Image (cartoon, rainbow, N blue to C red):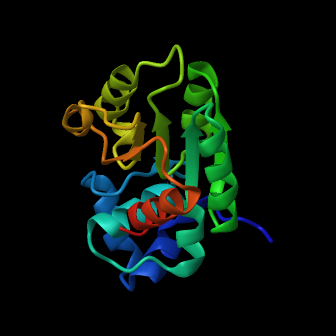
């Protein structure tokens, strides 16, 4: 099975039921993120960006493209979140695991996940600094962040104010993690 990573303006137009020139206008106005090919200057749209555009504009996401946006990056060392990784994979998510800030950054840029699960208990990782970096960069504007904080963390509201989309306790069962991730990816 071949996985689609980019779309032409014509393919995007067929998914939306519009003329390809409408898609080009969306790109030129900055509403839809795309890049130009050298030479003729044709546009190409990353599937993740197109799915984000569809969701932002309350348009239906085709099932074959929805699967491409189910990439999850987990930044954690705890055994519970590693078990959560297996549960997420069984639920149909494409899951990457990073145990340090360097590999997390590399996977964030290269993998283009739709959701980041960030464990605040990982030594050497400052969750507030990561949230600040993610929210200040336009290429991560569509990234959803689920923060895993210690039980009884008094800073839950501070995490949400810093840019986390949701916070769950670190001792959550894998099924609770899967349920929350599915809700966030399908929103």
Q: Nearer the viewer, residue 78 or 36?
A: 78
**Is any part of residue 46 visible from this angle?**
no
Q: Nearer the viewer, residue 84 or 128?
A: 84
Residue 14 percent location from the top left of the image: 47, 82
Q: Is residue 41 left or right of residue 78?
A: left
- Assign the C terminus to one quadrant of the image: bottom left
In the current view of this chain or complex, which residue is farthest to the bottom?
A: 17
Q: Is residue 89 left or right of residue 169?
A: right
Q: Is residue 16 above or below residue 139?
A: below
Q: Residue drawn at (29%, 29%), measured in percent from left and top?
A: 136
Residue 108 percent location from the top left of the image: 55, 36
Q: Residue drawn at (36%, 82%), measured in percent from left and top?
A: 18
**Is any part of residue 170 visible from this angle?**
yes
Q: Quadrant of residue 126?
A: top left
Q: Is residue 34 above or below residue 137?
A: below
- Assign the N terminus to one quadrant of the image: bottom right
In the current view of this chain or complex, which residue is farthest to the top?
A: 124
Count of numbered labels shown in the rendering: 0
In the current view of this chain or complex, which residue is farthest to the right?
A: 1
Q: Residue drawn at (31%, 33%), measured in percent from left and top?
A: 153
Q: Quadrant of residue 82?
A: top right
């Amino acid at each position: 099975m071949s996985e689609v990573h980019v779309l032409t303006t014509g393919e995007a137009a067929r998914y939306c039921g519009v003329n390809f020139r409408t898609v080009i206008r969306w790109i030129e106005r900055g509403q839809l993120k795309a890049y130009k090919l050298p030479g003729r200057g044709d546009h190409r749209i990353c599937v993740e960006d197109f799915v984000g555009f569809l969701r932002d504009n309350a348009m239906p996401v085709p099932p074959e493209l929805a699967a491409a946006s189910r990439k999850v990056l987990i930044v954690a060392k705890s055994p519970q979140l590693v078990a959560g990784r297996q549960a997420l994979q069984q639920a149909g998510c494409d899951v990457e695991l990073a145990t340090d800030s360097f590999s997390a950054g590399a996977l964030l840029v290269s993998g283009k996940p739709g959701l980041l699960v960030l464990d605040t208990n990982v030594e050497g990782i400052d969750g507030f600094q990561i949230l600040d970096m993610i929210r200040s960069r336009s290429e991560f504007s569509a990234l959803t962040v689920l923060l895993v904080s210690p039980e009884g963390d008094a800073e839950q509201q501070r995490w949400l104010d810093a840019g986390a989309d949701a916070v769950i306790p670190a001792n959550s069962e894998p099924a609770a993690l899967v349920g929350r991730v599915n809700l966030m990816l399908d929103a």
